[in-house]
Image (tube, rainbow, N blue to C red):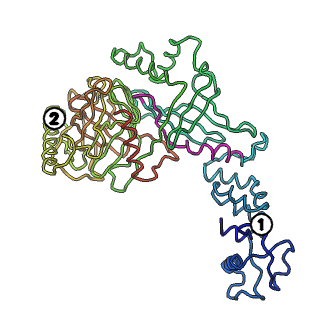
Amino acid sequence: MAVCARLCGVGPSRGCRRRQQRRGPAETAAADSEPDTDPEEERIEAGAAALSGAGGGRSAGPSSPPRCSLLELPPELLVEIFASLPGTDLPSLAQVCTKFRRILHTDTIWRRRCREEYGVCENLRKLEITGVSCRDVYAKLLHRYRHILGLWQPDIGPYGGLLNVVVDGLFIIGWMYLPPHDPHVDDPMRFKPLFRIHLMERKSATVECMYGHRGPHNGHVQIVKKDEFSTKCNQTDHHRMSGGRQEEFRTWLREEWGRTLEDIFHEHMQELILMKFIYTSQYDNCLTYRRIYLPPSRPDDLIRPGLFKGTYGSHGLEIVMLSFHGKRARGTKITGDPNIPAGQQTVEIDLRHRIQLPDAESLRDFNELSRVVLEVREQVRQEQEQEGGPEDAEGLGQQSPQPCEEPPAEPAQAPGDGGAVAAAEPPAQSGQGQPFVLPVGVSSRNEDYPRTCRMCFYGTGLIAGHGFTSPERTPGVFVLFDEDRFGFIWLELKSFSLYSRVQAAFRNADAPSPQAFEEMLKNIQSLTS
């Protein structure tokens, strides 16, 4: 701004009016109202003129060519220059002089900033009909609420969630992402709007709650602190249905599970579903969200990290974030359940200990698989004793604040194991496909799992009782099928979880640094530890 100001002739104390100094003959054609610069300003302007090719090679003096000032440029050129600057710099530029302030009211500038900074692809010219300018959209909507754009985890007790706040046309909308109906893990994600923000005429932005089935109604958004905000509904009567709680429950069940309670024969599963409805319905009027980042990617990662949908027995499908940390990989729950809540690390994989599966016929023998996995676990334990490391008995989680993992301590819902294992090998980026089949006795919510896999590694999974009581890490097998699918066999639970990548593009979700991502993982885990 200082250079800009000097090029425009702005002095340190006289605004746009510079002190008069003598002019060279070549400057006599300049407007009488344009004052001269002081020696320092004259030096900067002369340098700028030289850089632009004006008078290059000639020394400053009475016969030097005219100086180039931003104030002398035609307005249409200034519009192009200003439109290329970040929108956050333009208010300061408007303070330079009256001419700049007048030019910065040009909607072309703000239309470009809306498009380049926030991806607004709508035809913003139609705003003229409503009396809202692109400058209003930028200043009162996009810039004001820029801090809530991106991925967030709602604080809904153990259940968590995934909220994606995006600029959608001339709205800012908070979309709640939901896994597909159990057990169709390869189906696309479902989503529904929780709130939206838009401009009404030239007034300030309006926040509307989208919860319920009676249309948008009055709401409120408050940015609590950095990386945290809250929403509140001011008309919760819009959430109620005429048929009372029974109708609300039936509607929720169809949306959440795609079926009726009569279709669910497992009594324990019915209890879990009813418990989730009662618990989550308490948060329909006020929610707090904490920012989450997508995991950073490195060239040597086994597969591309990111978000995955996974099967978790009677709890249905849940969202897990796969990230890589050197020779280890971790699956962190973004959504959770009463046994293993959101934020906890459902699986950890030791990429130093690769498992070679036997032939398909031998793989069907669960006892053989269990024997091989327990041998690897003992090997891991001995290595840790020799290294004197602080890791847990399973050899994982040295950097993780607390071991945690998935399925509850009940066979129907908890994930399990199944696979044969061999000697430790370094992780590989690719491998020959090998036959894969679950051992006899290992349960799986989805029988449509791949029948070939790339490679397997030793890992541990977190199991616990209801209310996250007595959590413990148990041995298992991480099975890599392809770039977008993997599985985990829980030995103790004799259960298998299948994971499929969330195929969605998320903006404003990258961590500013690897350290920020690690800190985020610790924060979301500490909330439920």
Q: Could you tell whether 275 is left or right of 213 in the image?
A: left
Give the SS element for disc 1. loop
Mark 1 neighbour class, 10 Å CA radius: few under 14, some 14 to 19, many 20 or more: many
- The correct choice, above or below, for 525 with respect to 295 in the image is above
**Nearer to us in this view, 272 or 497:** 272
The residue beneath circle 2 is: 370
Of residues 2 and 338, the one drawn nearer to the viewer in this rendering: 2
Q: Position of residue 145 (x, y in %)?
A: 60, 42
Q: Position of residue 38 (x, y in %)?
A: 73, 77
Q: Residues within 10 Å of mark 2 (few under 14, many from 20)?
A: many
Q: In the rendered view, tell whether residue 181 sits above or below residue 516.
A: above
Q: Residue at x 43, y 40 (%)?
A: 502
Type of amino acid at the residue the image marks with label 1: Cys
Q: Looking at the picture, which amino acid does disc 2 mark?
A: Ser
Of badges 2 and 1, nearer the viewer stands: 1
355 and 203: which is toward the camera: 203
Is residue 525 covered in magenta?
no
The image's mark for residue 16 is 1
Q: Secondary structure at mark 2?
A: helix
Question: If you read the primary sequence from the N terminus, does the residue marked by circle 2 or circle 1 appear first?
Answer: 1
**Bounds of the magenta segment:** 136-159
